[in-house]
Image: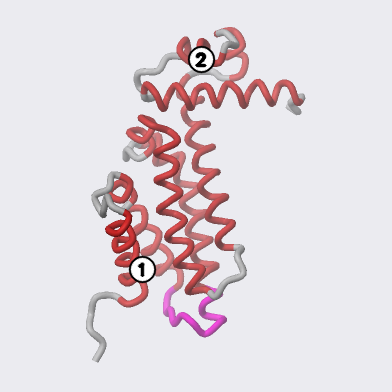
Amino acid sequence: MIMSETTTKTREQLIDAARQVFARKGIDRTTMNDIATASKKGRRTLYMYFKNKEELSTIVIENEMERLYEMLEAVEKKDLPADEKLVSFIYARLDAFKSTVTRNGSLRANFFHDSWHVAKVRKGYNLQEIALIKKILNSGIKEGIFKIPDIETTALVIHYSLKGIEVPYIRGLLGDSPDRVSRSRSSVIDLIFKGIKIKK
């Protein structure tokens, strides 16, 4: 169904109202009544667009993942040498996830929780992100910067390494001062590019 401009605008307003209520109260404690009240559109209008809270929470998380992906895609398209591009990509990803948490308040508890619901929503975007990493790695090989026997495995390792430090990075466990954050980010880059074994 093709939506009119007014219909599209109303739908976007309802989604943003839901995001704000989820951020304030958390998804579990939010009701459709809360969202209807926050949107100032009423329950009837809300149910015209969305079946239930689960559908809305899925859309909110999808929208946040889309924002993150667009940021990363913009980095991949930059005219930079592959090694600089990979560093920019890693920094952008860490900062983008932190920005998402700041923007969404208590939604972070659900956004980063390893539940089947969130995992299902993130699955497609994970694959898109891995594809972006592979593009950067392939560019690096063509430029003579990287030597990678298995691009698929390398891209997966980088992706899951970054995914694994999302929560500690966001919670400040990798550093709460600007200086410590900078050192933590540099350590991530060093591990990816240099490893930990002394070269003889």
**SS state under label 2:** helix
**SS state under label 1:** helix
Residue identified by numbered label 2: 38
Residue identified by numbered label 1: 189
Total residue callouts: 2
- Percent across and percent down for residue 50 are 56, 19
Q: Is residue 113 magenta?
A: no
Magenta-highlighted residues: 138-150
The residue closer to the viewer here, 19 or 175, is 175
Q: Amino acid at mark 1?
A: Ile
The residue closer to the viewer here, 186 or 160, is 186
For label 1, count other residues whose C-alpha is less than 10 Å away and answer few (under 14), some (14-19) or many (20+). some
Please tell me which residue is depicted at 45% across the width and 24% down the height of the picture. Answer: 54
- Percent across and percent down for residue 200 are 24, 92
Please tell me which residue is depicted at 48% across the width and 31% down the height of the picture. Answer: 58
- Percent across and percent down for residue 78 are 60, 65
Q: Is residue 143 magenta?
A: yes
- Percent across and percent down for residue 52 are 49, 18
Please tell me which residue is depicted at 26% across the width and 53% down the height of the picture. Answer: 175
Q: Amino acid at mark 2?
A: Ala
Residue 17 as seen in the image, left or right of residue 161: right
Q: Is residue 166 above or below residue 117?
A: below
Q: Is residue 196 above or below residue 167?
A: below
Residue 171 as seen in the image, left or right of residue 9: left
Q: Main secondary structure of the magenta part?
A: loop
